Image (spheres, grey):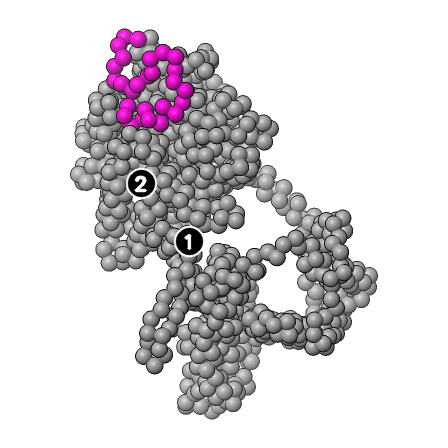
Amino acid sequence: MLVVVLSQLACAAALPAAARRIGRGVWAVAALVLAGSLAWLLTRTAAVLDGTTYTETYAWSPTLGLEIALRLDPLALLMALVVTGVGVAVMVYGAYYHHLGHGREAALLLAFAAVMLGLVLADHLLLLYVFWELTSVASFLLIAGRREGGDRQRAAEQALLTTVAGGLAMLFGMVMLGRAAGTYRISALLADPPPAGAMVTTALVLILIGAFAKSAQFPLHAWLPAAMAAPTSVSAYLHAATMVKAGVYLVARLAPGFADVAPWRPLVLTVGLYTLVVGAWRALRETDMKRLLAYGTVSELGMMIALFGMGTRTGAIGGAVLLLSHALFKGSLFMVVGVVDHQTGTRDLRELSGLGRALPAVAVVALLAGASMAKLPPTVGWIAQDGALEAMLHGHLTGAAWATAALCLGSVLTVTYTARLLQGGFATKRDDRPRRPADPPRPLFLAPAAVLSVLGLVAGLWYPAVDALTAPYADQYPEPTGKPFHAALWHGWTPVVWLALLIVVLGLALHTARRPFSRLLRRLPRLPDAERCYRRGMIALHHGAVVFTRYTQVGSLPLYLTAILLTVVVLPSFAVLTAMPPLDQVRAWWTPAELPLAVIVVIAAACAAMLKHRLAAVLVTGAVGYAVAGLFVVQGAPDLALTQFLVESLTLVVVVLVLRRMPSRFTPASQTGPGRWARAAVALLVGLFVAGFALTAPQGRENAGPAGDYLRRVGETGGENVVNAIVVDFRALDTLGEISVLMVTALGVISLIRLGTRTDTRTAAGRRAGPDVVTESAGYPTDRWDEPREHWLPGSTDLLGAERSVLMEVVTRLLFPSILVVSLFLLFSGHYRPGGGFSGGLVAGQAFILRYLVGGPTDVEHAVRVRPGHLIGVGLTLAATTAMVPLAFGDPPLTSTLWSFHLPLLGQVKTSSSLVFDIGVYLLILGVILTLLSAAGTSLRAPVPKLGTGGGTAVGRST
């Protein structure tokens, strides 16, 4: 199962590149991938329906209780068939609907199919949440498109904010439920639910909030109609057949174990049935065909939520059949609307007339799908309606008259808006409005919608197969006292049949009286508009954020640091003081060599606090870091010392470059007055706390921790350096997260630098450059007297004569290859001696920094033939791939494999797969440094303003 999900993701990643060669053909590739997944599911359908459950479990982080647990049971099978089956139809449809962006759209849709498939197969609450949020991200990208701003961007933001906010509530609920039950395994939760209590009740309410947000239940439904700004292929797949059913699936998954826990049943029935009525009522007011279908989807989702949440066997069958039928008829109708819009240029019911004659094939497909949506026999929608009415009328656990009345009212309105859609879209109007020209669509453009609508009819006629597909899930509920209900097209002339026929008649009669009914609608007060409420809420939230920021973000960096540092000190201090361990084992030092290094640290830190010259303060701060590296050496930690030394050197160079744009001295206001003493007191307090914590924390250990285990098992990694083994083997998951955070941080820094560069460029636009300033576009003449004909560094030709140093160019040219060789040595030897990918990447980055300082940004561009962003992407991909490859062989993620082979001259060589992970770290670190150099090049090499030695205008205020 995991291989199926990962293969879809891998194919999705390759589609954008493939689109450059095969263009529209990527849709066929995506369709074939989903067809393969569908075929795999079909081969296991019979066994699953007979009671076989397929499971896969992969250890991820056992200490945290994280694992990749997948489970294919009847409910997961039903949803997986919908995801893959409708996905194939959407991919074929997209090939003819989209004119541009084939690679991006096909890749995102296929990636969404993969994460949706992972969601329905997940048997772990936290894994389900991961896939849940990935569907929200994929939905945002599909709705927003490529262009910034506009209706699509706003709709995407609304969908993301609503679903992610609900997802956060759901995450809290899942954590609470898992803690109460002692397990996060969904199958274990349902087999042995935790006892009811305040914690379980709160957890279920939070989980239901997440489900309601995802499935567009009132009052969290406004994002779904707004999302109709997306292309029709996206609406047909995400907003009709798959993503919006994630919340329905979650309710269906948890209902067998928690339907009897208060307030599950009343909450689910109230929200679901109210949404059913409100959504159908709201659909009657729409003239846009897609928005009409969107509100119809909101209504149908409410009906599914209510049926699954009832917690009865009959309700479960009705909900499962409705889930299947809705995917077929709503996916087909969305595609039909897309065809109409594509062929006529509009989907407004007021502008369409005579399409039934102009596009008869499209009208027939719409009629078949509409019949299923209106729950007419012999479609599968009729079977779903039969199960729903049976559950409400004869459900011994519900039986409330208001619930039956709400279901009937919503069903009547469903018939009415279905008739309105078909009549308004395809009938010939009696007025004199001109008909829009409409050419018949290409057969393959209409074929996916036709297949889905025909399947809705076939499923109704072949109802034993529908019952066989839905009954195994419903059998999880307690058996009714009478004869069990089964999905069928005909149960005789029962009260349910008469009620269903009455619903159809009333719905058609309401449509026939649409003119007086429309006048009545206009007179009635409108329900609160959820879209308007959302906009007002966002405006109020923004206003509140501005007010809050005005009082908390006062522009004083010392104030911010004071608040942060005091919080760090005050909160843990109570725990430290109340549980102070004995300090009789504390030693002042271990070797005499530590004493002079400690004195250097103290003196340098004190000088950094008292010096008024910025550069001097930075240099003595660097001395603190180098002295700490010396302490690491004395303590026998050369790997830590090497890393500290390299990081300190890199930081020192970057800070010195930044200081070129700042006053040479600190502002006088920051050096005098009570603010300085307050900052000194805070610094002293924090220093004492950190020192005290460093002394007491080791004394409070009750066991040796994992360090001893790492030392004993270092041989299993194939190396001898325990530090590197921890970084890339034992705790490789931590490293993977850290380099991901580093990448995101670098992107944020780059964005800020480039934003400032663009602002400075716009501010300086139109100004006349001074004699000492050479603009980027001006270049340099080729006949300058101080420009040599040959250069040691290619990029040095862009530098002024006063900025060049031939000696440094020669030294840099000679040292650059050697530094890179040293970095590679550290990379490949890190498993056996101090070094590794992180240290090697820092050394390689400093080689390019040297070229940047001597030859300028242009020289770095000459030296690097690969885009820094590509290095970052390749590095992260290598690390992540190394983590996931063991899953294909049945091992936990990040499992290392040892290799031994013979090489000429070198003899027998031993290595492990963690070396590939280390190479990924090396490339990512190097890419981040090069990206920062590329982004900061213009800003840092720009002319330095002439500032007085006494300082300049202070930014912010001092305390």
**Above/below status of 503 relative to 590:** above
Q: Is residue 414 left or right of residue 669?
A: left
What is the secondary structure assignment of the residue under circle 2?
Answer: helix
Q: Which residue is mark 2?
A: 233
| Highlighted range, magenta | 467-494
Dominant SS in magenta: loop
What is the secondary structure assignment of the residue under circle 1?
Answer: loop
Q: How many C-alpha atoms fall within 10 Å of the one at disc 1: few (<14), some, or many (≥20)?
A: many
| Circle nearer the N terminus (1, 2) | 2
Q: Amino acid at mark 1?
A: Pro
Please say whether residue 477 is one of the residues in the magenta stretch.
yes
Quadrant placement of the C terminus: bottom right
Q: Which residue is mark 1?
A: 893
Task: Give residue 793's position: percent from left, percent from top.
Answer: 44, 84
Q: How many C-alpha atoms fall within 10 Å of the one at disc 2: few (<14), some, or many (≥20)?
A: many
Task: Give residue 333's position: percent from left, percent from top.
Answer: 29, 31
Q: Amino acid at mark 2?
A: Ser
**Above/below status of 551 relative to 188:** below
Quadrant placement of the N terminus: top left
Residue reaching furthest to the right: 674
Residue reaching furthest to the front: 712
Give the residue displayed 76% in from the left and 60% down from the top. 584
Give the residue displayed 44% in from the left and 87% down from the top. 792
Task: Give residue 586's position: percent from left, percent from top.
Answer: 74, 63
**Above/below status of 865 relative to 479:** below
Q: Is residue 456 left or right of residue 238?
A: left
Give the residue displayed 41% in from the left and 74% down from the top. 864
Which of labels 1 and 2 is toward the front? 1
Along the line of sight, which residue is nearer the eye, 833 or 146?
Answer: 833
Give the residue displayed 39% in from the left and 12% down from the top. 481
**Image-quadrant location for residue 689:** bottom right
